[in-house]
Image (cartoon, rainbow, N blue to C red):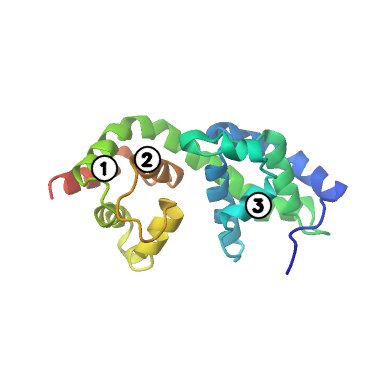
Amino acid sequence: KDAGPAPVTPEALAIAASFKTDLDTFYDLVDGRLVAIHDMLNTIAMANNKPPLPPPAIAYLCELTEEQGKNGGPDGPQVTKDQLVSAFAKMIPPGDSKEVFEEKVIQHVRDASTRRQFANTVMPQLKPKLMALHGKVGGNADKLYAWFLDLLPPEAKDSFPKEAFMGMIMRTPPNTTVIDAAKFLSGVHNNMDENDSIEKISGVIDKHMAL
């Protein structure tokens, strides 16, 4: 069984370090939270036709220390900016150029930063409504999943099973029946994009509040 990526080459580290500004921007927007970094790395993996990465792989890439793993609090562990750069260096295959890395990986980091900036702006205004919805349904996973499906365009509904909602968006085991409020808020926050206007999300919340 593969023991994981080979040691980082100086060339790979230099390429990753050359995009430190992009990585620092994302880091600051997500407060260095491993869970948000994991979401972004999964987006990059899927964009490059690779399977999503399991949590241990992310902890390994970021060289998460035992201390960091223990001191996460409700939002999970935080890594350092250097750990983030080093994680990206590990993702560069030998022989890949800076240009290829920028196109395959860094472009997605920039897109993720744009999305996160947007999410950080709208989330404070949406939080009371999201909490009200969560309270009304008592965190019921089926009802929150039904709400989430209503946010998706019609063509995407069929391709988003409940397992994906639970695992990728809410980060809870698929058989969980009640989703914790903090997990619900963070799942919405981490997966928002610019199409998710306050009006759109509020409208779908109102609809489900009236059910």
Question: CB under 8 Å between callouts 2 and 1?
Answer: yes
Q: CA separation, marks 1 and 3? A: 35 Å
Say above or below: 198 vs 171. Answer: above
SS for tag 2? helix
Amino acid at pointer 2: Leu
Q: What's the CA distance linking mark 3 and mark 2? A: 27 Å
Residue at the right extreme of this rendering: 10
What separation in Å lies between label 2 and label 1 (alpha carbons)? 9 Å
87 relative to 114 in the view: left or right: right
Q: Earlier in the sequence, mark 3 or mark 2?
A: 3
For residue 151, above or below residue 67: below
Q: Residues within 10 Å of mark 1 (few under 14, many from 20)?
A: many
Which is closer to the viewer, label 3 or label 2? 2
- Going from the N terminus, do you reach mark 2 or mark 1 first? 1
Question: Secondary structure beneath disc 3?
Answer: helix
Does residue 74 appear left or right of residue 71 in this picture? left
Give the mark nearest the N terminus, 1 or 3: 3
Q: Nearer the viewer, residue 108 or 167?
A: 167
How far from the left and from the top, in percent, is residue 65? 67, 40
> What residue is disc 1 on?
134
For image coordinates 23% across by 37% down, the residue present is: 132
Residue 60 position in % (x across, y down): 68, 50
Q: Which residue bears the numbered disc 3? A: 105
Circle 2 crowding by C-alpha within 10 Å: few under 14, some 14–19, many from 20: some
- Image quarter in which the N terminus is found: bottom right
Image point (60%, 40%), residue name: 69
Badge 3 amino acid: Val
User: Callout 1, which amino acid?
Assistant: His
* Residue marked by disc 2: 185
Badge 3: residue crowd in 10 Å (few <14, some 14–19, many ≥20): many
